[in-house]
Image: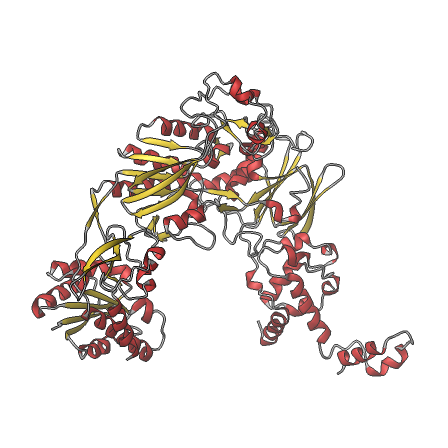
Amino acid sequence: MNRIGVFVCHCGTNIASTVDVKAVAEALSHERGVVISQDYQYMCSESGQNLVKNAIKEHNLTGVVICSCSPRMHENTFRKACSEAGLNPYLVEIANIREQCSWIHKDITTATEKAVILGRTAIAKVTLNTPLTSMESPVVKRALVIGGGIAGIQSALDIAEAGFEVDIVEKEPTIGGKMAQIDKTFPTLDCAACILTPKMVEASQNENINIYSFSEVSDVKGFVGNFTVKIKRKARYVDETKCTGCGLCTEKCPMKKVPNEFNAGLDNRTAIYIPFAQAVPKIATIDPNYCMMLKNGKCGVCSKVCTAGAVDYKQKDEFIEKKYGAIVVATGYNPISPEKFDEYAYSQCPDVVTSLELERLMNAAGPNGGTLLRPSDKKHPEKIVFIQCVGSRCDDDRGKPYCSKICCMYTAKHAMLIREKYPDTEVYVFYIDVRTPGKNFDEFYRRAVEQYNVHYIKGMVGKVTPKANGKIEVQGSDMLADEQLRIDADLVVLAMAIEPDKSARPLATMLTTQMDTNDFFTEAHPKLRPVESATAGIFLSGVCQGPKDIPETVAQASAAAAKAIGLLCKNSITCNPCVAHSDELMCNGCSACEKVCPYGAITYENKEFRMPDRTVAVRRVASVNPAVCQGCGACTVACPSGAMDLNGFSNSQIMAEVDAICK
Amino acid sequence: MNSKNENLKEQVLRASGVNVLKCMRCGKCSGTCPAYGEMEYHPHQFVYMIEKGDIEKLMNSPSIYRCLTCFACVDRCPRGVEPAKAVEAVRLMAVRKQDGNRLKPEQIPDMLDEDMPQQAIVTALRKYRK
């Protein structure tokens, strides 16, 4: 005999202003099995919870229905309260009459009617609820950081500092990421390499950190506390254990015409290469797309000059499998290509460059050794035009709808650095808005205007035309003066929009975590859980979650690390008992469930069954590993015989809910 | 803003299909316009003045006949505002305006010449009918 208690929350005016809560409580009191039905101002408050607890004891309740906000908000609160009062926490059902009712309706009569239906549905379900017990699952005390940029390095260092093992998987031959390519950092103008490389070295020297460079994550299985990750170690054709990083091979390699990605393609490198002087690990890598030995079998110079005998042309991609308790995603970003923006003539003129290319043009380790020269004729540019928001805040498919956040500041930085080093240069910046929120940020931008005399023009450039005399005509509007300007520039710099790295989307699929339409990872809550993904045990670090500058990235990286450490500190975690199970007598062994299970939780086994005629038959039946099952329910839908069922969301419970709605 | 202006604005918005609220005032349309120097009001001003309801000022300005309808602004606008279509709509308002006839039916016979296609006469009458 069911004894159900119904508790209807006002949520201040959130619910009560559109739903007649008293009428709901009254209507639900007549439902079958309901022994008490009450309304209260704030059910989640201490006194509201006490109301529920006392009712459980007083009326000896066998089920509780709370009509309130989304279960995402307070399901745990009420489960805990009921468990304190001696009721199994899984005998609590939440009817969402706020997000799915009061907030979306204006008419009190309709909303009240719907709230009653939602309450009745929850009552129908709770009648069939069974007590469930959570299991414990052990936590593997090791973390994986995907991406070795400043975000990944910082997260790894913090986790390692707390005493846990960390592996960094980086797809490039070295860690360092985009920050390694940047010349100076705002707003202090200190050299990026000078503050980054000590961290890179620290990461490589920390005995808790293991760096898998030139590697990619190829498969992820498991769940929070117990992920099994397959890592592809791409063949670099150099034995990492032998290479000393002397660089002799890179000097002797005859294939010298490979575009150097570290210098944004502005100069060339050799086919066997070390990306830059401070690379970590400092190990040579052979680019198989250009190496003549690997392509045609002719050359072998690097192997001959290598005194350590590290070159191995026969190396193959290797796969390793490791277990992790937590995963930090730090896959970073790339600037988008300017090629789609014909009006800026990037493809036609080498002196139209992107901001990242300018970083390299100005860097001491760049193609010009730190002297700013035009790529076309290696002359000093006297007039430089910066164009901001290229592809950012863009409504069409050429660009990105969001603000890339960092461009205002780095453009001010570029303008200032150029005016400081070459005071004879005229610098113009075309802007739509200058956005500089942040500590010492607006002061920085104002310094560019007031001290360095950078000409900021409110308006956008419409057209860039390379001229025969080597000049570049920039035609744009000055909206404050209401005139159209034509500037004959020597160099044009495009502040390109940024986008998440292309590897992020397939990774999100492997991690079964969510992304937004722009391929940024979605955080569990935009305000209150900014570094966790919606999938337990997966944390977000840096630009993979949204555009950020370096200080913000580092802050978020440490936050993600703190969350990961919090998880790794535990010896075990409580599992969700709402997992699938199969009725062996009904299972026909078709494998449909095994195929749809995204967690690999279902296996098949041959079992002996006693048949009605007293013979023994061996049948193939499904079996669910409750520690791996995440309770998504895909198998229950796929099962043709109805053998697969989900605890807490059984087929009969769902049908009862549907019946209650349709009544 | 009086109701007559609101009505004109409504007509321009409907005729052009342009959503002026999408404009983020970057000025790329005016930065790209090849007829900029010839215009009293420039493409970005068209968009802003339509938003404010200043349609009559635009209708009476020669700027509406200076726009080449080259669609460079439409092509390059990062927000998809399509200023040239807004200009075209204002031009249409001016052409359709009543009481502002520049041609009276009785003037037509004197203006006829044998090279003028019949279609043009019919159109002119239809367009400038009182």
In the rendered view, does A579 fall on the left or right side of A394? left
Q: Is residue A549 above or below residue A649?
A: above
In the rendered view, does A255 fall on the left or right side of A625? right
Q: Is residue A284 above or below residue A2?
A: above
Which quadrant would residue A251 be assigned to in this image?
top right
Q: Residue furthest top?
A: A307
Horizontal and vertical percent for residue A234?
45, 35
What residue is drawn where x is 48% and y is 45%?
A: A502
Q: Is residue A583 above or below residue A326?
A: below
State the residue in front, A60 or A475. A60
State the residue in front, A213 or A419. A213
Horizontal and vertical percent for residue A83?
14, 59
What residue is drawn where x is 27% and y is 69%?
A: A654
Res. A447 in view: yes
State the residue in front, A146 or A404. A146
In the rendered view, does A371 fall on the left or right side of A235? right
Horizontal and vertical percent for residue A649?
25, 64
State the residue in front, A251 or B22. A251
Which quadrant would residue A550 be assigned to in this image?
top left
Horizontal and vertical percent for residue A24?
23, 76
Q: Quadrant of the C terminus of chain A?
A: bottom left
Q: Quadrant of the N terminus of chain A?
A: bottom left
